[in-house]
Image (tube, helix red, strand yellow):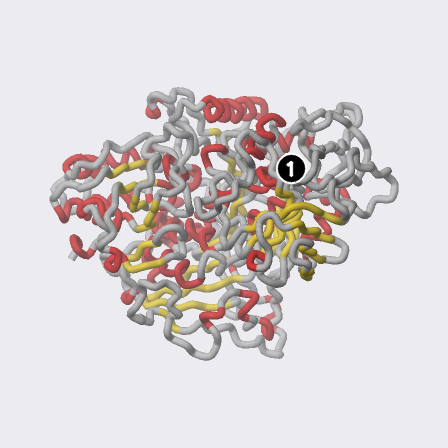
Amino acid sequence: MASAAIASNPSTLLKKNELGLSSFSSSSLPIQISKRRCSKKVVSVMAPSQTQRSPSTTGSVKTAMTMTEKIFARASERSQLNPGDNIWVNVDTLMTHDVCGPGTIGIFKREFGENAKVWDREKIVIIPDHYIFTSDERANRNVDILRDFCTEQNIKYFYDITDLGNFKANPDYKGVCHIALAQEGHCRPGEVLLGTDSHTCTAGAFGQFATGIGNTDAGFVMGTGKLLLKVPPTLRFVMDGEMPDYLLAKDLILQIIGEITVSGATYKSMEFVGSTVESLTMEERMTLCNMVIEAGGKNGVVPADNTTFKYLEGKTSMPFEPVYSDKQARFLSEYRFDVSKIEPLVAKPHSPDNRALARECKDVKIDRVYIGSCTGGKTEDFLAAAKVFLASGKKVKVPTFLVPATQKVWMDLYGIPVPGSGGKTCSQIFEEAGCDVPASPSCGACLGGPKDTYARMNEPQVCVSTTNRNFHGRMGHREGQIYLASPYTAAASALTGFVTDPREFLQ
Amino acid sequence: MGAAAEVTVFASTRTFISSQNQSRSPCIPSRMIINLRQNPATPITCSMKSPFEHLSTYSSTKSSITPLSATSVSSPTTTSNFHGLCYVLGDSIDTDQIIPAEYLTLVPSNPDEYRKIGSYALIGLPSSYPVRFVEPGEFQSKYSIIIAGANFGCGSSREHAPVALGAAGVKTVVAESYARIFFRNSVATGEVYPLESEVRLCEECSTGDVVTVELAESRLINHTTGKEYKLKPIGDAGPVIEAGGIFDYARKTGMIPSLSPST
């Protein structure tokens, strides 16, 4: 809805100023323009962006669409549309949580009436996850508001929690909404998923359109099952090469955000393709799509494939129909990566695009490490951290907080054996390394939260975190310093007490 | 003040009282907040504004409300102008700075909590911003116009962000560019009018400058520096704002039925 609408006319594709892509003009400049002081060495890991050729005059490319465009077309029952079109789409799933749910419900009732019914009691998923394990009365009350509404509306999917003292005593409770959505089979290729949380884009990993919306929009969807959305143009990110064993999806997305900046994908879709992406697990793809919003992106997508279908087996019985970008689809820009040239990264305070090589920050002394959140608190994230602790065999030098995203992740920490450990579980390895005991699953301190939130940063400290944002005050204290990193880098840093490249332990 | 006048009227236009400069004028800012109810049978007395009814310029069937108290400065505030002191911010002001997460337990659709959210607007700014946006103990700011750099409102989708600004008395944000969810939420809620400038106004204006934003002329006038600036047209969001927000737009275009009096 911005006034700087991106025209789909190919001749305007190279309008650099509007798109903020001035670093990647068509005059082939392989050199990364160094915006940050630390990057003294010029390393080319990206070929210059290539915009799509002008469509041929045969007219056959008129119907060529990107994945995102196809999802919009189907959801709006049109055969054709263009980026920039504002259209009403049918929503397949609406998600809300304890922070935004009450406000959404308030608007729904105000606009549709006290006795109004939601558009479809099976298409709304209500997941308390943000401020759960706290004595804050309003936070607790907000979960009660959700419960009352779910009872009144007979909402099918409400992952309730009533016993705050023991999360395991709540059979329905899941934890972090984006991980719960995936684990419970609510993410399906080709569908439209909206959520009252900016990291709803995580679900794009399943080849669907997923984005974050506010309370008012969500209140509207609650009553109608539709929303007015603008079709975004797509940026394509092609990642090829074998993933080095010290690199994780977090490094890939930090690389991208550092490249295009926090507004580089504003109002655009980010499509991730290439052999590297195809080799990623679903959880790694989720990490990739999770931080699309940190580049300003509207949504992220990864084409569905056998990895996707296998993950979905047993999780959903609803039919789905994946979509794929046409060969001749028009992309705003294309970025190519040789993954073998990417090194472990951090995003330094106070912006997710303040990218730096982890090894160049080795003199940064840290006070704590946080491993958790939808970005870095999934089972595979903890397995990755455990791998580093196992390789080291030593103890952490700073308090290391572990917050599993969901109940299932928590159980995996205590159940799944870590490869190469002789049968030890993550929890055992974490204990031997001197980490804190894995906490109750929730969003935790990723966004600070009420003052009594576990692992909240209440003093101006330096933290390496597997979370998604490091703006001022993000984890609590306004002057806190947060270095965003992969679970490998976070674990390595915990072991040394400084920001540390995980190759110190993994090679 | 702070509390909304509990009035139910059927006006689509109202005028804004500019925020006063406390050191210059004895006027106490008074905001009569009108809740345009589609449902006259059950008036709700709360301080929630229906989206943009104060900015509606299309309706000719409804009467307009004149301001209760005059402003203390010379330029009259009309339905198509915003006038007051500006507060200047830099680039990428994210939602954690606009309204830190610890305050998100407040529910915006609850009138008392809506007011409280306003008191915390921009409380997350780092110490590099020496001037506080809302004074401790206050619920509203004396700055009614925000001037910002690029990517304003980035970060979270929390609607509390435009709500905090609106509740604190901000009428409009004039930024170089916006993050999309914040922009969308501003349009949907009607809390602040999101405008874009053509140049980096954040480098041309200073906190405390007296400015006027003229919607019809797409212009910002800085009375303190004497300079004028062109603003960008509102673009695709125009029809939604004109209608009064996403719900009114949907009703106007027949996407959802009008609220019947019996509900």
At 47% from the left edge and 48% from the top edge, which residue is drawn?
A201
Residue A428 position, x and y percent, is: 17, 35
Residue B188 position, x and y percent, is: 65, 43
- Nearer to us in this view, A435 or B139: B139
At 36% from the left edge and 56% from the top edge, which residue is drawn?
A254
The quadrant holding residue B190 is top right
The residue beneath circle 1 is B22
Does any portion of residue A110 appear in the rendered image?
A: yes
- Nearer to us in this view, A204 or A43: A43
At 35% from the left edge and 25% from the top edge, which residue is drawn?
A167
Residue A128 position, x and y percent, is: 45, 31
Q: Is residue A460 left or right of residue B161?
A: left
The quarter of the picture where the N terminus of chain A appears is bottom right
- Residue found at the far front of this picture: B24
- Nearer to us in this view, A350 or B44: A350
Identity, as a three-letter code, of the amino acid under mark 1: Gln
- Nearer to us in this view, B217 or A467: B217
Does any portion of residue A278 appear in the rendered image?
A: no
Total labels: the figure holds: 1
